[in-house]
Amino acid sequence: MNIASLDPNAPASSRNVVQGNTIGTDVTGMRALPNFEFGVFITAASDNLIGSNLISANGLAGIEIFGGRGQLGGSGTAASLGNTITANQIGVDAAGQVAFAVSNGSQIIGSIADHPEIRLPDGLVVNYGFQSHGVVVIGSSGNRIGLPGQGNVISGNILTGVYITRRDNELNRFALPVDNAVQSNNLSINGVYGVFRYDAPNGNPVAEAPAPDANRFDGTPIPIGDFVTGIDVSTPQTRTQSILLGPGGGAPRGPRRPPRRPTALGSASLTPSLAASRPAVARPALAQLAQLRRPR
């Protein structure tokens, strides 16, 4: 599903409601029928409500909010879109169970024999029936992932529950996302991160206990992680480097071994006609995220 405001001469695509759907699964919500890239993709569109849906098994991400090409190269803060994501199940089956295998950062939990690799038109590889990220925000501000007392279940995603960044898969830089609030969500049992902020550590609040409307992170190896390009306090700054910061953006920690990416049995690829029909979109930096270093 694509909600987009691409033509400046056309009416803005805003105030849409996506509610009560199964996206990426069959009608029962128990069997994967993936979209391979995104379940819901929002581009430069504002004030949309994504609520009470089951969004799982969609390859790269269940939901992506992209600020649009107008944010490319921006040195200031990204435009506010004000989209709301609430009361969804993202990454689980209709029973609320983690139905699809996840990684614990070093190995796959559960079998992946029935999840062959799919190569996307831009070269990224996903596994059939898996979802790498629950919610991704690239170059967009002012979105709400969960409302006070009414969050989402975002579990069972291979890498991250919520991924907020100013960089896409090709490391293009967009305007800085701010004021993206993550609250009242169940972010348990995601593969590596509950919330990951890539070059966007400040101004995107993530509620933690004992604060009101805190998110839950049970069973997720790293509840909150930040990756900031150009920071390395463990070695002399002789070149641009990066470091993973501790939960909540605390004191930097030294480099650690990277988690291994999942491997799958078998392979498949999208047909040329399908590949040619796909518009250019911003994709999360999947390969870079999989190589990031973990704290002790």
Image (cartoon, grey):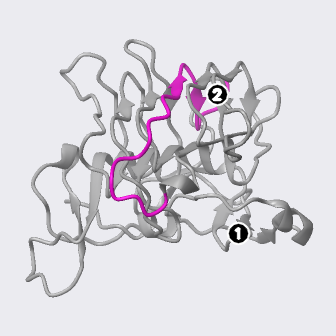
Report how many numbered discs are placed on residues in the image. 2
Helix, strand or loop at mark 2? loop
Give residue 7's position: percent from left, percent from top: 71, 46
Give residue 110's position: percent from left, percent from top: 57, 51
Please tell me in which quadrant of the rendered image residue 275 appears: bottom right
- For the C terminus, the image quarter is bottom left
Residue 215 relative to residue 174: left or right: left
**Residue type pointed to by label 2:** Ser
Count residues near mark 2 (Cα–Cα under 10 Å), then give few for <14, some for 14-19, many for 20+: some
Asked if residue 211 lies in the magenta stretch, the reply is no
At a point 15% along the width and 72% down the height, the residue shown is: 232
> Which residue, as the protein is rendered here, is positioned at the far front?
9
Give the residue at mark 1.
Answer: 265
> Which residue, as the protein is rendered here, is positioned at the far top?
149
Asked if residue 88 lies in the magenta stretch, the reply is yes
Q: Residue 195, can we see it?
A: yes
Foreground residue, 84 or 106?
84
Residue 164 relative to residue 46: left or right: left
| Residue 237, numbered circle | none
Give residue 173's position: percent from left, percent from top: 43, 64
Helix, strand or loop at mark 1? loop
In the rendered view, would you say 58 is above or below 260? above
Residue 194 relative to residue 214: left or right: right
- For the N terminus, the image quarter is top right
At a point 52% along the width and 47% down the height, the residue shown is: 67
Foreground residue, 64 or 70?
70
Give residue 288's position: percent from left, percent from top: 44, 69
At a point 69% along the width and 62% down the height, the residue shown is: 280
Q: Which residues are magenta?
A: 72-94
Give the residue at mark 2.
Answer: 14
